[in-house]
Amino acid sequence: MAGQLSWINGYAHETKGGWTMSDGVEAIFKNTTRVRDSLDSSDAAPLPIKKSKKSAAAIAWKSLLSDWGTGAIIPVVTIFLWQLAGSTGLISAQFLPTPLSIARAFTDLLITGELTHHLGVSMGRAGIGFLIGGVLGLLFGVLTGLFRSVEYVLDPSVQVLRLVPHLAIAPLIILWFGFGEMSKVVIILTGSFFPLYINTFMGIRNVDNKLFEVSRVLGFSPYQKLRRLILPAALPGILLGLRLSLAVAWIGLVVAELIGSQSGIGFLINEAKQNSNTEIVFVGIIIFAIVGKLIDSLFRIIERRFLFWRDSYEG
Amino acid sequence: MEEALLSISNLNKRFESTGGHVQALYNVDLHVQEGEFITVIGPSGCGKSTLLRIVAGLDNGYTGSVTLGGTEIGGPGIDKGFIFQEHRLFPWLTVEKNIASDLPLGNKEIRRKVDELINLVKLNGFEKSYPRELSGGMAQRVAIARALLRNPKILLLDEPFGALDAFTRAHMQTVLLDIWRANKTTMIFVTHDIDEAVFLGNRVVILEPRPGKIRKIVPVDLPYPRKKTTSSFQELRLKVLNYFEKVDELELIDGAGI
């Protein structure tokens, strides 16, 4: 019952697209008044820190809303037409199940607890693979970014490996590590290593040389240089790398689970395919999409939280 | 002559490039006493920024001697404060954290000094603001406070107000003079604005280009605070301008010869 409710809630959320979009428009207007406010008060008094923090959170929330609201128009219309085509018998249910029957399959899986089990397994795999690959990517990226000698030794090899689609080596990984958890984690980590490595490296190399001069004039120690200058300045690159790495980890997960596994969302899809259970295939795909989108949105919030100081064009 | 704080003797600096070399500085001699306010003026390309960067320890590869407090300049450091043309604040730090930079604000002594400096550069109320929320003049004042927190022996300013509008610039000049009189920090101020040079300096150093060398050092004996409208100020301004125009002519003749 609870599952049904949450699905309905999710559905209702999407159908709210109409007014959340107008909310987005409102957010734009609010933004302009905010700019005007700060212009007015610029020579009188500064924005108190509390207010600016709060408004940063409010902006993040608003943008999440408008992000979902405006972005929901196309899916909502598609789902409506799709259901119409299914209900009128225009498309066979075996070929393309209707949204409602997919929703039913979704709630069934949720009630039996299968869905949460498989989702948990999948997220655990993606999480571990991403964590190991990400830490390695960050570490190597920082080292090659900081030291040109390391760059000369390491970067050419990494660049060659990067150009091999990481899914092409998946069969090799299975050959080496078997069908167990190990091979899945390795497939995911090889994918998530590169985006973080490259963006950390580029982030460090893009630090403004003028600020380096400042750190010399202020007599920063090497540690201070890293902590006070390089890492904060490279943070936009590092966060972008994290986001891309997570996306790749998610893709690696699907491949790893489709190749062969006894649990996870990929397994759910594969098994449903064998039993011609098209609804469940759709449920699996939708789960991948929703979780992927949620993670991506979370990262946008993190970016806004940590990169609010950036004075760049925001569209 | 008493022992100078900063002694520049027979300083030569050339930049090698593909088309030969450029003599950026030629036999420059300058001796700055403690507490002096020196302004350096000259057309672009006369090496005034190079001179300042050498004193700061940011540029090397020169011949001659540059000593601060009796010791040769080894490299950049906190005893030589430097204000760039742009404020160059860390955009991710608030005003007070920018001033402290690598020093811990939790330290009571540093906290007190930072508060004092914020008072001195008149930024009370903006402690928690970020650089993007500041005007150009305010940001440059933060940069000055950041340099002063380190108690530099000398403060080097490279056209710090060049990007500001005329009103803000005039305001910043008085702020800087207030700071100078309160702290007695020795200053070398590079500018291409004659009014600014005469308004601020004890002595105005006029540089000429190609090769960059000192044409004349004009002492400015006017008492502070100076008024730009007085006839004595205008007289000195004309005197400097006169040299300056000769430099300009030289440059034109040089250019015509190419």
Image (spheres, helix red, strand yellow):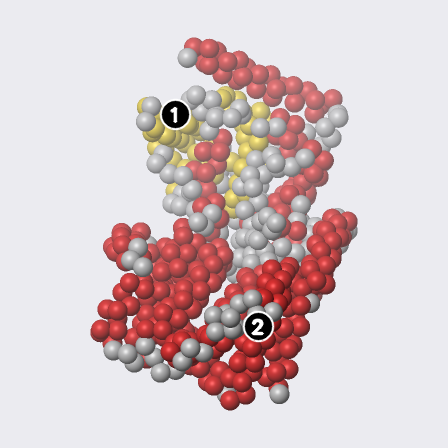
Vertical side of B202 occupied by A300: above or below: below
Residue B246: give x, y in percent of width and height: 55, 15
Residue type at mark 2?
Pro
Vertical side of B2 occupied by A118: above or below: below
Q: Residue at position x 45%, y 24% from top?
A: B212
Q: Residue at position x 59%, y 84% from top?
A: A3
Q: Nearer the viewer, residue A95 or A66?
A: A95
- Tell me if residue B119 can be seen: no
> Which dot, 1 or 2, sits closer to the camera?
2
Vertical side of A254 occupied by A194: above or below: above
Splitting the image into 4 quarters, where does residue B240 fall?
top right
Label 2: state its secondary structure: helix
Label 1: state its secondary structure: strand
**Farthest front residue?**
A89
Residue type at mark 1?
Gln
> What crowding class fits label 1: few (fewer than 14 Cα within 10 Å), some (14-19), or many (20 or more)?
some
Q: Residue at position x 43%, y 10% from top?
A: B257
Q: Quadrant of the N terminus of chain A?
A: bottom right
Residue A309: give x, y in percent of width and height: 59, 56
Q: Nearer the viewer, residue A141 or B116?
A: A141
Q: Chain of mark 1?
A: B
Tell if the residue under mark 1 belongs to the same chain as the one under mark 2: no
Q: Residue at position x 32%, y 23% from top?
A: B20
- Tell me if residue A77 can be seen: yes
> What crowding class fits label 2: few (fewer than 14 Cα within 10 Å), some (14-19), or many (20 or more)?
many
Query: Which mark is on residue A249?
Result: none
Query: Which mark is on residue B23?
Result: 1
Splitting the image into 4 quarters, where does residue A106 fall?
bottom right
Q: Which residue is mark 2?
A: A99
Residue A240: give x, y in percent of width and height: 47, 59
